[in-house]
Image (tube, rainbow, N blue to C red):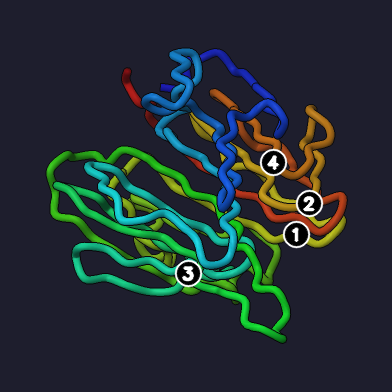
Amino acid sequence: MSALLAPTVDVRRAGGRLASRLSWLDSKHSFSLGTHRPDPANTHHGLLLVNNEDLVQPGAGFETHPHRDMEIVTWVLQGSLVHQDSSGHSGVIYPGLAQRMSAGTGILHSEKNDSYRSPGERPADPVHFVQMWVLPDEAGVAPGYEQLEIDGELLAGGLVTVASGMDRHKDAGAIRIRNRHAALYAARLRPGQQVLLPEAPYLHLFVARGSVDLESVGGLDEGDAVRLTATGGQRVTATGPAEILVWEMHATFEV
């Protein structure tokens, strides 16, 4: 597929993202989805349809709502997020714990910041997380849920496989997603540490925290993203403490 694509590097700055702001929510959207400011020129990159960065205030969150035929990966940067769904799964997601929910034939779930303030206690913290959606290979499968602690692997500073449907990652200890053409990596980098981007028809690099320098591009700050096509191998260097999320994709969503 990559032979048919022209190499491109598309930098998207944090301030250019769509935003939803409520009293309890500050949400920034890398892509246009559904009725949220529909933009047919910005619906996806490769297989990635959603890359939302959310900040949810204490005692608030997303009430029970439905999803269908979507692989949803949640990555918490700060605080903790309480998950409950109609398949009987519940848990608390925190930094270093990856979560995947397969909506399949249909699922209801809620996501809340259950921290609160009591008289005399310090203020409770907001929860800061990134949620990413890719389509499954096959529609209409049974809903599913998986979470995995990978905090220890992140300490090494390299790219860690967080979630993947690719055959080569079957033994990587990553969460499995139901798309054989996609994989998500994360890296926590100290100043000066470097990683190399994989080579793929479609890559999406998101700076979740801190700042980095991307070879042949330059500086990227928190919230910046780069959409790469038919390329890879570029060096990413942390210019301060940083955390990045990288999607490797070998197919694209057909509108």
- The image quadrant where one finds the C terminus is top left
Q: Is residue 47 left or right of residue 30?
A: left
Location of mark 3 (residue): 93
Q: Amino acid at mark 2?
A: Gly
**Could you give the CA–CA distance between mark 3 and mark 1, rounded to whole angstroms?**
21 Å
- Reading the chain from its start, which is encountered first: label 4 or label 2? 2
Give x and y (percent) for residue 93.
48, 69
Q: Amino acid at mark 4?
A: Gly
Instruction: Report the front residue among 38 and 230.
Output: 38
**Could you give the CA–CA distance between mark 1 and mark 4, rounded to whole angstroms?**
16 Å
**Could you give the CA–CA distance between mark 4 and mark 3, rounded to whole angstroms?**
21 Å
> Can residue 4 be seen in the rendering of this structure?
no
Query: Circles 2 and 1: CB distance less than 8 Å?
Result: yes
Location of mark 1 (residue): 189
Query: Circles 3 and 1: CB distance less than 8 Å?
Result: no
Location of mark 2 (residue): 210
Location of mark 4 (residue): 223
